[in-house]
Amino acid sequence: MKPIAILYSTVDGQTKKICEYLANHLEQSHSKIHLYSLDEFYEEIPSYHTIIIGASIRYGKHNEIVERFIKENRQALEKINSAFFSVNLVARKTDKNLPETNPYLIKFMKSIDWKPDLTGVFAGSLDYSKYRFFDRLMIKAIMKFTNGPTKTEKPIEYTNWERVKAFAENIKSLENKNRSNSLQEATA
Ligand SMILES: Cc1cc2nc3c(=O)[nH]c(=O)nc-3n(C[C@H](O)[C@H](O)[C@H](O)COP(=O)(O)O)c2cc1C
């Protein structure tokens, strides 16, 4: 079976960590998982069974390379199984942690002409010690505005790993869908 590619766009590493978790989980059922930073991915998309793209939010947006990659490869992406997820801190709120309720994911999906088979949203992490002065000020302001902590003694990881695991399980069901498509093609 063709491999699965997991592509990440990260700044502080949380999206990569989520992608590594997905890779470990999917490895149990799929022997070949390739993990790439999105800006280092130059492979042929049709050589993959599934492509999963994960990207974090900074100042309200995913990195522009995410949208560019999807726009440039939309047709190829539509022919294979695909999943997209966003990582942000707004998703720590229970009323904003679903694809249907997370404002960044909703806006992003409206901005691109691509419908992945699966979408997800995960809360990221907060670590003031990592941020530069200006970023720290801005994040503090955002957190104050959304009733979050404006100080941290150590990093706070809001990512709910059970939900990441459930996302991985849903990706596995996409594999089943793909297999049945191949069967249909073979018997047509
Ligand atoms: C400079 C900066 C800006 C951010 N802007 C937002 C934002 O606008 N909305 C939000 O929900 N989270 C925001 N975040 C939180 C990140 O999305 C969160 O920390 C995530 O875990 C980062 O993932 P990464 O480590 O993969 O880059 C911001 C974080 C930083 C450092």
Image (cartoon, helix red, strand yellow):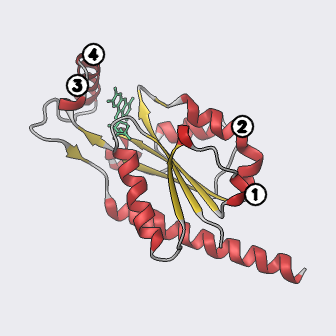
Residue 134: mark: 4
3D distance between C-alphas at marks 2 and 1 = 14 Å
Q: Do the residues labelled 4 and 2 touch (CB within 8 Å)?
A: no
Residue type, label 4: Phe
Decide: few, some or many residues near mark 1? Use Cα within 10 Å; few <14, some 14-19, many ≥20: few
Which of discs 3 and 4 lies nearer the camera? The answer is 4
Identify the residue shown where x is 31% and y is 45%: 92
3D distance between C-alphas at marks 4 and 1 = 42 Å
3D distance between C-alphas at marks 3 and 2 = 36 Å
Q: Looking at the image, is mark 3 or mark 2 earlier in the sequence? A: 2
Q: Do the residues labelled 3 and 4 touch (CB within 8 Å)?
A: no
Q: Do the residues labelled 1 and 3 touch (CB within 8 Å)?
A: no
Examine the image and state in which quarter residue 154 appears.
top left
Residue 3 position within the rendered picture, expressed as x and y whole percent measured from the top left? 60, 65
Identify the residue shown where x is 69% and y is 71%: 178
- In the displayed structure, 35 sits above or below 172; it is above
Q: Looking at the image, is mark 3 or mark 4 earlier in the sequence? A: 4
Secondary structure, mark 3, is: helix
Residue 80 position within the rendered picture, expressed as x and y whole percent measured from the top left? 71, 59
> Which residue bears the numbered disc 2?
72
Residue 165: mark: none
Residue type, label 3: Lys
